[in-house]
Image (cartoon, helix red, strand yellow):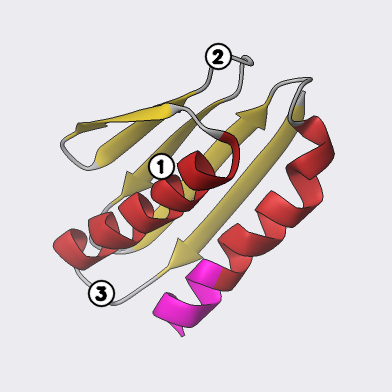
Amino acid sequence: MKNIRVEREHKLGQAECLKLAEQITDKLIDRIGGSKVIDGNVIHYKHISGSKGVLTSNDESLQVDVQLGLLVRSFGSSIEKEIHESCDEYLS
C-alpha cells in the first residue's frame, strides 16, 4: 500500500475546513471511485480496491491520511500532488 499523509494548519474555521476536506475527498472519488461517509468533522473514504482514508478537520488543522490499495497505487504520486495543491490553494 502507498500511504499519503498531509497535515496543514489553517485559519478557515471548522466549517470551511470540512468543506475543503469534502472537496479533496470528492476529487479522489472522481479520480479512482469509492464512497465517503461524513461523521462530524471526520470524513471516511473507502474503495473496493482496499484503498481507504480519513480526513479530519478541526479549528486549527486539516489532516489527510490515505492508504492506496494495490490496484490504484500507481496513481499515488499524482494523487498526493493533487492533495497538496488543493491545500495550497485554499489554505494559503
Label 1–label 2 contact, CB within 8 A: no
Q: What residue sits right under mark 2 in the picture? A: 48
The residue lying at 76 percent from left, 43 percent from top is 76
Q: CA distance from mark 1 to mark 3?
A: 16 Å
Residue range of the region highlighted in magenta in the rendering: 86-92
Chain-order first, disc 3 or disc 2: 3
Residue 13 against residue 3 in the figure, above or below: below
By secondary structure, the bulk of the magenta-drawn segment is best described as helix
Secondary structure category for the residue under label 3: loop
The residue lying at 19 percent from left, 60 percent from top is 14
The circle on residue 26 is: none
Q: What residue sits right under mark 1 in the picture? A: 55
The residue lying at 23 percent from left, 61 percent from top is 59
Nearest to the eye among marks 1 and 2: give it. 2
Q: CA distance from mark 3 to mark 2?
A: 33 Å
Q: What residue sits right under mark 3 in the picture? A: 12
Name the residue type under label 2.
Ile
Chain-order first, disc 1 or disc 2: 2
Q: Is residue 2 left or right of residue 36?
A: right
Name the residue type under label 3.
Leu
